[in-house]
Amino acid sequence: MSFRLTTRGLTIAAIFLTVVVVGIGVALAATSTPQFCGTCKSHVPYIDEYKKSAHRDVNCEQCHSKPGPFFFLTAKLEALQQPIAQITGDYEKPILGYVLNQSCRRCHNNDLLFHPVSKNGIRVQHRHLIEAGFLCMRCHSTQAHGDAVPPGSRTYPSMDQCLICHNNQFKDPQGQVATSRCDLCHTKPNYGAVPLTHKQNDWATRHGAVGILSTCSACHVKKGACSDCHKGILMPHPAAWISEHGVIVGKRGGNKACDQCHDTKEYCKTCHQVKMPHPAGFVDSHPAVTAQKGSDTCFNCHVVANCQACHDLHAAGDPRAHKLLGGANSSLQSTPTPISSPIAGGG
């Protein structure tokens, strides 16, 4: 069986190929619109917020696919599974999207971002952020979809983000220090001078557990700014704090110094397992406590030498041991005297 190329055959093939290409193009374009995405019930809140945003004239694929025809087609192939997922309900909830810097930079180019942007009393230089590798979504995840973005994923421009670098300590590769001078960003006196986190009701008790402590030094520049509130206790706690805190806390007023940050009724038990400081008569009762809690509990604070200070004396029959035990009735099995052995090779 033989085939011949004819003018009619080539024309039909060309028309068919053109229809297929145009059809694919129309399908790709149609499935990249908010109207198409809005046909899925799960996407309706996102589309409603999108229509009210400054990005309402930007197609979905321009943000949610990496620039370039190859990545566009790859994103479309991945999206083929979405209709089935929507029908079966087998998709991740809540829906979380991701936007790369390259997608934002399709429109927000250097001409726009490499100059200071001043708005509502705040001046921002995005160039340094971009060159440092910060993601746009770190501050602007709600730009297109507003309150439809789940609360845990919402990010906004905030002083806490700025202070990661602008804390008088961070240096760029050229050695330039990122200053925390207020008028660098605040164009209006006292505008936004207090970070939003500081206005939270529980900030006084939880500030040490969130954020990065080095950012505190951006504003709290006076020596002892932390220790003045923390009853003279160094903050953050120094490296040897675990072994030294008992003595230091005792000198600073006991648990009152710790109560500012810790629930001392429960927090101390996570390590100590026993009442701290030890109550009167604890030396007499500690063997029973040790048997119940295990000796590992003791070694959170003590070393073997602490035990030997009493037990070696008692085993040797030294009367000083009884004074240490407060006259408690105690008896230990006699320890046989070890037989000394000659040093190897010294016979």
Image (tube, grey):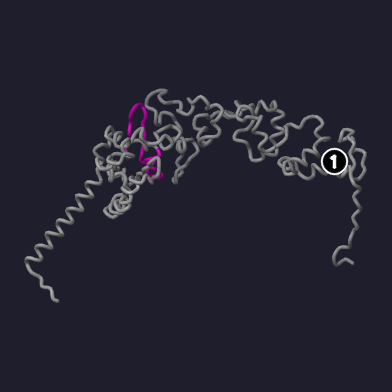
Q: Which residues are magenta?
A: 115-138
Q: Position of residue 120 (x, y in %)?
A: 34, 27
Q: Position of residue 220 (x, y in %)?
A: 52, 29
| Side (left or right) of 320 relative to 40 | right
- The quarter of the picture where residue 296 lies is top right
| Residue under label 1 | 310
State the residue at coordinates (45%, 41%).
Answer: 176
Picture layout, residue 160 above or below residue 10 = above
The quadrant of the image that shows the N terminus is bottom left
- For label 1, count other residues whose C-alpha is less than 10 Å away and answer few (under 14), some (14-19) or many (20+): some
Q: Position of residue 183 (x, y in %)?
A: 41, 28
Q: Position of residue 272 (x, y in %)?
A: 70, 37
| Side (left or right) of 206 relative to 182 | right
User: What type is the residue that disc 1 sits on?
Assistant: Cys
> What residue occupies the far front of the structure in this picture?
88
- In front of the other: 254 or 334: 334
- In front of the other: 294 or 189: 294
> What residue occupies the far bottom of the structure in this picture?
1
Secondary structure state at the residue bearing disc 1? helix
- The quarter of the picture where residue 310 lies is top right
Residue 129 among magenta residues: yes
- In front of the other: 109 or 15: 15
